[in-house]
Image: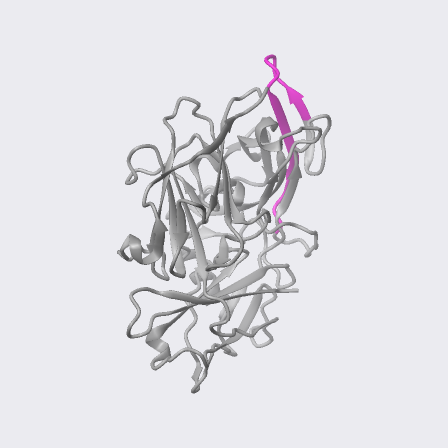
Amino acid sequence: MYRLIFLLLFIINYPLSIIHCSAQDKDIRSVQFFVGDNEQSDQVMELNGTEQLTLWFDDLNEERAPLNYTIVHCDADWREDGLFFADYLDGFEENPLRDYALSFQTKINYMHYELRIPNKDVRFKASGNYLLKIYEDDRSAPVLVCRFSLYENRVVEVPLRMRTPVQTGEKCLQQLEFSVKHASLPVRDAYKELKVRVTQNGISVPGIDPPKPVFVDRDEVSYTFTDRNFYPGGNEFRIFDTRTLDFGAQGVTTVRYDGQGFPYALLNVDRPGTGRPYLFHDDINGKFHVEAYRMGNRQLEAEYVATGFTLKTDELHEGQVYVFGELSNWALQPAFRMFYNHETQAYELNVPLKQGYYNYRYVYVGNNGTVDFTAIEGCFSETENYYTVFVYYRGTRDKYDRLVAVQSISSL
């Protein structure tokens, strides 16, 4: 019974808009957004801390006009909240992207952009959720939109605990238990003033409603349930490595070049993970790392490689298959939809990707719009995932949803 209810929620209610960065233009590629120099981190940072957020991306349109950026404050559910610019930022509302350079001796030319915030143009005054919008001359028509969050340190404590559910008998699920200790906050009505959101591997958990309190004490709110807070373990991400084009590295069958010298990497033939035993391997939770061996500047000298994916399986007549991960901006993008080849009896996809080390997985989307992240990959409670709990607070005198705690835990 638990399995049936969970999978219905998981398939039907997954909000596809929950992503890190959304490229609104097909020429915007290789988007990475992280804290400091840690490319595997989520875009979550302490307000008034010592670190900066780093944005990297490429633009394959060399003739585009210079790009600009603006920053907008949002509520706990990523809706623009109408907060005045002066209430959340010091500096200028619109700023140019100054740090960019053209690729060097690559087969496909591209402009590489970098931005670090806060900087001399913008400094943050408020915690919470933000949208970073990159645009040409009209900020209402951005070419790239990225989300990030700033939290207030040492406001509340959030002890976390992971366990494998024992009641359900389900070997797919993982369970999260936690509480919010808020002695320094004047919480009068925890149900109205506190909002809690949970992410798995940095993205919102499909089909799961935000947690609600089960027990409220004077200085602590408990979110520990015996029959809730279940999350699909899924499976480990698949891996391929194109940091070298001299030979097929991990996950790559062969590398070849066309008549004009453009590289093509054919990945290993994949098969569905369903019906197979769980096998641990050390992934990077769906992210990627740009790198090209023997290159002086990896961001400007790495090639864009035509990358060939192959999923050997029967044709799924009632839906489509997508390649998914940070490489697709955590979205089901048309450019990452696979098509069935009846001659090879496999789903196939060719997509240009910058040289690097990549994680990915396959996602099934029904013709009626339902999304299933486990139909192809399988689902195991042993899978390594990390969970992050975000605690927002809006007291009676607050104008916005303050982010007062961020805490993470691994399922291992």
In magenta, the rendered stretch is 255-273
Is 209 included in the stretch rendered in magenta?
no
Percent position of residue 59, x then y: 46, 30
Identify the residue at image location x=63%, y=45%.
238
In the image, residue 280 above or below residue 341:
below
Identify the residue at image location x=58%, y=57%.
234
Which residue is most to the top? Answer: 259
* 364 or 402, nearer to the observer: 402
Q: Is residue 247 left or right of residue 50?
A: right
Specify the quadrant that holds the C terminus.
Answer: bottom right
| Residue 395, visible in the rendered structure | yes
Percent position of residue 137, x then y: 30, 33
* 335 or 372, nearer to the observer: 335
| Residue 17, visible in the rendered structure | no
* 193 or 223, nearer to the observer: 193
Which residue is most to the front? Answer: 120
Is 270 included in the stretch rendered in magenta?
yes
Q: How many numbered discs sit on the rendered protein? A: 0
Identify the residue at image location x=37%, y=80%.
186
Which residue is most to the bottom? Answer: 218
Percent position of residue 285, x then y: 59, 51
Percent position of residue 401, x then y: 35, 65
Q: Which colour scheme is used?
A: one colour
Residue 249 position by quadrant: top right
Q: In this view, does 310 lie to the left or right of 184?
A: right
